[in-house]
Amino acid sequence: MEFKDLGLLPELERAVLEAGYTRPTPIQAATIPVALTGRDVIGCAQTGTGKTAAFCLPALARAYQASNNEAVLHTLILTPTRELAAQINESLSTYGKHLDLWHTVIFGGVNDKPQIAELKRGVDILVATPGRLLDLMQRKAVSLAHVQLFVLDEADRMLDMGFIHDVKKITQALPQKRQTLFFSATMPTEIRKLAANLVKDAKTIAVDPVSSAVEVVAQNVYFTDKDRKRDLLVHLLEGADFQRVVVFTRTKHGSDRVARHLAKAGKKVAAIHGNKAQNARTRALDGFRNGDIQVLVATDIAARGIDVDDISHVVNFELPNVPETYVHRIGRTGRAGKGGTAISLCDDEERSYLSGIERLTGKRVNVVEQHPFLPVPGRAAPSNPNANDGGARREASRRPVAQGGPRGNGGNGRGGANGRGGGNGRGGAKRPEARGGQRFGGRGSGHKPQGGSRPARPGGGERAAVAARSR
Ligand code: AMP
């Protein structure tokens, strides 16, 4: 199954190919065609399976169909955490970049004024966490009266986090006549009951849990000092089995710094991140694929498009503070049942992140106790208020392990093939009627919305902090 077989709008198909995806994941292949027919779906899938695109692509298609010159909230995506909400909103920007749609994200813990102002200006798609949405609904800052597509993401986590009553209140405000895409990693009784109340004649789709990536990838952590990480990395890269390595850094500047250091040490390295031009990015990826480049240093966002087979190692130069990000990262290796190794360089401040990761995966990360860059006592940076001392206790109680090689099998079944013709030529037929031609009037090919055809909205640049236009 390829993206062109899913019945997506050409603009959406183009965007996913530009994101570097070559094939739909199993949840995408199963969900997208069904969702595009307007049918309800119960998707049993975890983070890491590609479920975000499985609902974002139909959500964008649906919002595009329903949209008009004025943005009206037709699509609501409800998710439990602000991190997931922000990620989904980013995905909407990525996949919807060739469509002329407005979307935004609202979550608690931040000033609500810019969110209210953005809602007032009008959005086609809203991503929200339950508490803030309910609050803004009660204050009449948002109405769900015109919602045609409702996505409930991570329903079981909503339950775990105590949001289920908020979710129920929100769903009561939705129109009865609507489409619902319901996603949950697990289906305990309460979640089944909730689903039964929300969907009609739904198709149930289940895919292998992402934990298979967690199972198949050998995971090691090296405790060290922040300022020794670069040298430790060079040392590790001397290992003969470090053939095709992705190094993750938190920031764009960080990835440039690490790449420069590795280049000085004689490594064949390239950095890819949002500040790099597309052709530099493509060159780097091609070099990485054909073996000219041993190490690709990337930020999480840039790494989304990396779909390269046989990545031997993923290195977390910094540990992510969102545990799901760790699972995404390590899923880059160990694909299709092949073993790979994930290595985390962990300084004193990051130990709490490691605990969070272990809680999420339910698995301990092996500590490599013998290496030349162990933390020097008394040298660590002042400790982070978020850090705890659990790491020290854990470290002492763990046994050293060999640096991991391949083990186990399973894999998440994500496609590893690359290179395919970008054929489209479907799905476009509906657009002229749906748009009344207004979005494209006098604008080039008529296949590619050029943006700006919607009336300009007041509010300018600051809006970018909370809202994004999908193009
Ligand atoms: P998710 O389960 O939606 O959080 O996605 C997990 C990761 O897989 C994200 O980093 C996505 O960018 C990536 N991804 C989603 N769909 C595909 C695809 N078809 N091919 C390759 N990577 C993908």
Image: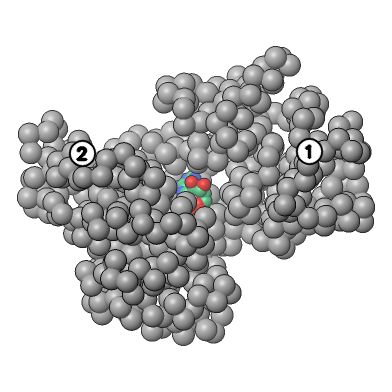
Res 207 seen here: no
Rate crowding at label 2 as few (under 14), some (14 to 19) or many (20 or more) other CA atoms within 10 Å: some
Q: Does 375 sit left or right of 434 as displayed?
A: right
For residue 381, the mark is 1
Identify which amino acid the numbered label 2 is placed on.
Answer: Gly
Residue depicted at x 33% and y 36%: 422
Q: Position of residue 220 (x, y in %)?
A: 78, 45
Q: Position of residue 4 (x, y in %)?
A: 32, 46
Residue depicted at x 38% and y 68%: 133
Residue depicted at x 40% and y 62%: 128
- Tag 2 residue: 451
Identify which amino acid the numbered label 1 is placed on.
Answer: Ala
- Pointer 1 or 2: first along the chain: 1
Q: In this view, does 29 lie above or below 136?
A: above
How was this image coloured? one colour
Point out the image quarter for the C terminus: top left
Disc 1 versus disc 2: distance between alpha carbons? Answer: 48 Å
Count the labels in the image.
2
Q: Nearer the viewer, residue 58 or 132?
A: 132
Q: Which of 111 and 330 is in front in this view?
A: 111
Q: Which of 375 and 4 is in front in this view?
A: 375
Q: Does 300 sit left or right of 419 as displayed?
A: right
Q: Where is residue 342 in the image (x, y as percent from the top left)?
A: 71, 43
Res 444 seen here: yes
For residue 446, the mark is none
| Label 1 C-beta lies within 8 Å of the nearest ligand 1 atom | no
